[in-house]
Each structure stands twice: as structure tokens, then as C-alpha cells.
Amino acid sequence: MLLSISHATTYFYRQPVLFGPHRMFVRAIEGHDVQIRESGLRVTPSARIRWLHDIFGNSLAIAEFSQPAQTLEIHSSLMVEQFNTNPFDFVLDDLAVSLPFSYADFEAIDVALYNTVRHPADTDAVRRWIRPFLSAKGTARTLDFFTALNKSVPLFFNYARREEPGVQAPGETLNRRSGSCRDFALLFMEAARQLGVAARFVSGYLCRPADSAASVVAEDATHAWAELYLPGAGWKGFDPTSGTLAADLHVRTAVAREPTHANPISGSFSGRGDDYLRMDVKVDARAIPAAGG
């Protein structure tokens, strides 16, 4: 399946300002499941752009500016081919079939930073949320549990698009019963970590199907979801905003241990605090109809 993604972000300022370095995660993560066919990145005012792999292996573009401007425009384009058409095409190792489970010794040291609870103040609230999905003894079939928990979010929480940076703490999302895709991803991650399961944050896009005129939750925006490391399956994507497993319409641009490490675009400027006016984000992410379709 071919997917086309156009992502334009424009920052407006009251007067010309000088920009500090800007970090951009706008290139798809390639692998056996996703391959890039075309890509482009345009930045105005002109900037020196260099690429590197960050500590998580993501392709990171860094733009460095030499001239001030009153607007900053960043436009990326992608054409990718997606092969992950069946997200359930895996078999869990015997040790991971039921919760709770322990990782094998050779993996335990590597997942230790990913299955540690990061919001201890919200532990009780998260436990109350996941309790109905567990047996009286606190056990469950691993895939059944996470699939049901994932599906429950769009049923009992309200999605609220938010372009501003920052993520709600899991307890706040539970209290509000609403949040952005970033908030739901973090809540899901924290639930997994409380059960000792390694979880990480994913930034990317959710594309519209080619054969449907219906709207897609979180469409026309950057998107975020969670990945869990399940022995036998590897890192598997769970999208609590849509209630689905990440599959052929999801495109990853960054993975990280915490949301703050995977902001699609981040940077700074030199000027007065009130020089910044607003930000506009336009995303068009869609599947391309098959030839003759």
C-alpha cells in the first residue's frame, strides 16, 4: 500500500526574530514493514540542514539559521510503501502469553528503562482504570488484555486535538476523561509499565483510507501512539486514540522512551516573549488508490 503525507508547519511572529536550531522528526522509520519511495524537506528562511540518528535510532533533521525572519515555514513530504497489512501476524513466546510475565535475562537489562513507572503519583488512578480488565488475582491473557484496554479508550474518553507542546499526566487524562493522542499514548504506556511491560512513545501519522470518504480520528494532524515490547512479537503498536493496533495506515517518524523526546518539531527563537503569535499546522496523510481502483 502506498501512502502520501504532506506536513506543513508555519510559525508567525510580530517582528523578525532569529531562530535557534530546530529539530525535526519528519522522515519515516524504514524497515521490513515500511519503505520510503520519495521524500522532501523544505525550510524557509533558508537553513543549513544536517541529518543524524538520535539515541533511539530515529532520523533527526537539525536546521540551523543565519538570518532573521517574521515567519518560519517547514514543509515535509513523504511517499512510503507500507507492508504491515496484518498487525496480528505474530506469535507470542510462551513466557509472555499471560500477565504478569518476566522478560528473559538477555532482554531484561535492555527493557529496564522502558518498563519503569514514570508517574508514581498516578499509580492508584491507573490501577483503578485497568482493574476491570484483570482477573481477581490480577492476571490476564496478554493480548486479550491490551487489545481490550486499547479499544476501551475511544469508547469512554473524548479526543481533543491539541497542537501545543506538552502531555497530560495519566491521572489528569483519567480525571478529565479526555485528551489528545499524546495523552492517550502516555496513559496506555503507564498502564503497561505498571504490569512490568516495556512501553515506548511513537510519533508519526495516521493516514486516511483510499476507499473511504468517512473521516478518521486524528486526521489532518500529526499522530501519536504507544508500542509495547512483547516477546515473540517484538515492538507492537497500540493506538488507543483509534482503538486499533498500528497497521498499514500508520507511519512512524520517531520512537522514544518518553513523549518529550519525540516532538515532531521543536526549536527556539531570540526575541521578546510576545513576539510569537501563533502556529498553523496542515497535514494531509492518505492512502493512494491502487491503479485501476
Image (cartoon, helix red, strand yellow):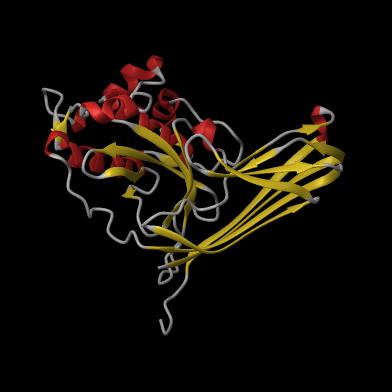
Q: To which quarter of the image does residue 129 belong?
A: top left
Q: Position of residue 203 (x, y in %)?
A: 49, 44
Q: Residue at x 40, y 35 (%)?
A: 200
Q: Residue at x 56, y 31 (%)?
A: 166
Residue furthest bottom in the image: 292
Q: To which quarter of the image does residue 117 belong?
A: top left
Q: To which quarter of the image does residue 94 belong?
A: top left
Q: Is residue 228 above or below residue 249?
A: above
Q: Nearer the viewer, residue 235 or 127?
A: 235
Instruction: From the viewer's perspective, tell me whether residue 173 is left or right of residue 104.
Output: right
Q: Residue at x 80, y 47 (%)?
A: 71
Q: Position of residue 242 (x, y in %)?
A: 38, 49
Instruction: From the viewer's perspective, tell me whether residue 93 is left or right of residue 70.
Output: left
Q: Position of residue 51 (x, y in %)?
A: 62, 46
Q: Residue at x 73, y 41 (%)?
A: 278
Instruction: From the viewer's perspective, tell me whether residue 236 is left or right of residue 203.
Output: left
Residue furthest top in the image: 121
Q: Which quarter shows the C terminus? A: bottom left
Q: Which quarter shows the N terminus? A: bottom left
Q: Nearer the viewer, residue 77 or 52?
A: 52
Number of dots carrying numbers: 0
Q: Position of residue 218 (x, y in %)?
A: 48, 50
Q: Nearer the viewer, residue 114 or 143?
A: 114
